[in-house]
Image (spheres, rainbow, N blue to C red):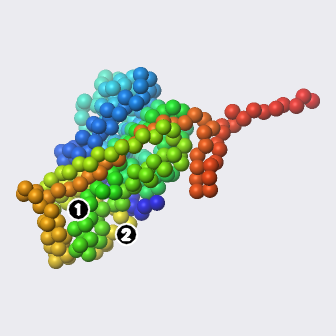
Amino acid sequence: MKSIDTPRLRRAFGRAAHRYDAVAALQREVATRLLDQLDAFGERKPERVFDLGCGPGRAAQAIHERWPKADVLAVDFALPMLRQIDSDARWWRPGRRCVQPVCADIAALPFVEGSGDVLFSSLCVQWIVDLPAALQGFRRVLRPGGLLLFSTFGPDTLCELRDAFAQAEAGDPVTPFARMQQIGDALQAAGFRDPVLHRDRFTLTYPDVTALMRELRAIGANNARMDRRRSLTGKARMRRVFDAYETLRSDGSLPSTWEVIYAQAFAPQPGQPTRDDDGEIARVPISEIPIRRRNR
């Protein structure tokens, strides 16, 4: 379980809401690739779809356009992000809201059991403190056979920035991200079936370190580690960070690596077991337990 300052993260995304779309080019590309994987749901028509960590709601709108008769719930814990959805008339049509915003923490979904057919989440899962527990919650909300589809950052993300800070002995500015194997293990432990994982590796370029850090603040991706340095990083130490990063300059730009992991899985049928550290635990709905009645 990683240690993340969730209130700090919520404030950061709230401050970033009004300019998020203008700077989140990578996030839009990853969401587009993840939306393509909705084909895994086949020819079925979902009744309800959740976009978890929806941000300003672009993916939620795309899902609604794909399945116009489905209820699409756009879920985010930063209320200013949800207000970006309401601010655009494109999200409305006479007599009905196209996308329904819900302010909630995706790590503790406030929805009834078996209420959704598809759970979609692009680049939000990495901010969850306890991923195995959250996946248990995802399974609870999905109907049997429902599709779980998410993307998340992998541990190689921002490795150049992390190395530069390490060389300058300035701490670690990057939130720890789960490895692919950890994600697969958590999916299996939660009882999801047919998990499929793959990854992309993106290299973005920046004119200098300041531009990279400015973009991170603009999308709300501040350092949310609980063990982060609380005092200001001095000018001399930041100069060493910049100098260490400069050794990577090529063709006038500095590289920045972003590892993205994609996960796809299906909710099991009722009664399928989950596993914890002590082994399997069978969970069977009481309605499926045969009862022998004695004649009196």
| Residue 43 drawn above or below residue 111 | above
Q: Quadrant of residue 118?
A: top left
Q: Is residue 8 left or right of residue 105?
A: left
Classify mark 2: residues with Cα within 10 Å, few (<14), some (14-19) or many (20+). some
Kind of residue at badge 1: Glu
Q: Quadrant of residue 94?
A: top left
Q: Quadrant of residue 210?
A: bottom left
SS class, disc 2: loop
Q: Quadrant of the C terminus?
A: top right
Kind of residue at badge 2: Asp
Q: Position of residue 102 (x, y in %)?
A: 40, 41
Residue under label 2, please give it. 227
- Who's the residue at 58% across and 34% down the image? 269
Q: Nearer the viewer, mark 2 or mark 1?
A: 1
Residue under label 1, please give it. 160
| Residue 187 in view | yes
SS class, disc 1: helix
Instruction: Looking at the picture, tell me which residue is in the foreground, 60 or 77.
Output: 60
- Who's the residue at 54% across and 33% down the image? 144
Q: Position of residue 211 (x, y in %)?
A: 14, 58
Q: Position of residue 59 (x, y in %)?
A: 31, 36
Q: Is residue 27 left or right of residue 68?
A: left
Q: Give the mark nearest the N terminus, 2 or 1.
A: 1
- Who's the residue at 17% across and 56% down the image? 255
